[in-house]
Amino acid sequence: VAEFASGWERFYRVIRKIPRGRVSTYAQVAAFAGNPRWARHVGFALAALKETRTPTDVPWQRVLGARPRGMAGISIRDSVGAALQRKLLEREGVDVDARGRVDLGQFGWRGPRVQRR
DNA sequence: ACTTTGACGACTG
DNA sequence: GCAGTCGCCAAAG
């Protein structure tokens, strides 16, 4: 059913499910998309998204790079884009520290379903 | 069909 | 904490 999805479309589907005010990681998105080893491709797909789609279609800002200590961080290389991502996240109520890191224990997305308070 | 490219991640020194 | 390596693998040229 609707297997039109090219590889990257799967990532977009997962990312669209991330609730406002929550964040996830590339690896996490990849895992929910079917394979935890596609983390790099998530980032690649999002970079491509920048050119082919409108940002509003997929909440790319909620996808961060994995960091130790249950943290996630802005992993975007373009400083302008990184600043934008930070701004968008803060606008959603996500607390981003000075180094662009977010506590997953507090804002991390638990998964597509298992939200259940 | 081969090579290059990555908004990654885990590990090493 | 930071820089370098390696493993992973789909898309684009």
Image (cartoon, coloured by chain):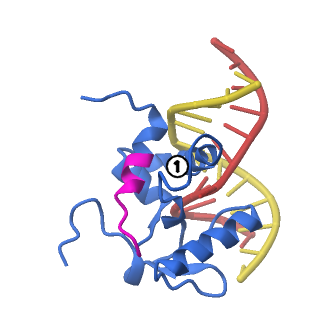
Chain colours: A blue, B red, C yellow
Of A40 and A47, which appears nearest the observer?
A: A47
What residue is disc 1 on?
A42
Q: Dot 1, crowdedness within 10 Å: few (<14), some or many (≥20)?
A: many
Q: Is residue A68 visible?
A: no
Describe residue B5's horizontal placement relative to residue A33 as left or right. Answer: right
The quadrant holding residue A86 is bottom right
Per the rendered image, the range of residues in magenta is A12-21
Describe residue A99's horizontal placement relative to residue A43 as left or right. Answer: right
- Picture layout, residue A94 above or below residue A27: below
Q: Residue at x 35, y 44 (%)?
A: A34
Q: Check the residue under mark 1 and report the chain it is in.
A: A
Q: Quadrant of the N terminus of chain A?
A: top left
Task: Single out the residue that lies furthest toward the left.
Answer: A116
Describe residue A69's horizontal placement relative to residue A108 as left or right. Answer: right
Query: Does the magenta run of residues contain A18?
Result: yes
Element class at badge 1:
helix
Percent position of residue A85, x then y:
61, 69
What is the three-letter code of the residue carrying label 1?
Answer: Val
The quadrant holding residue A53 is top right
Percent position of residue A40, x then y:
57, 49
Q: Is residue A26 visible?
A: yes
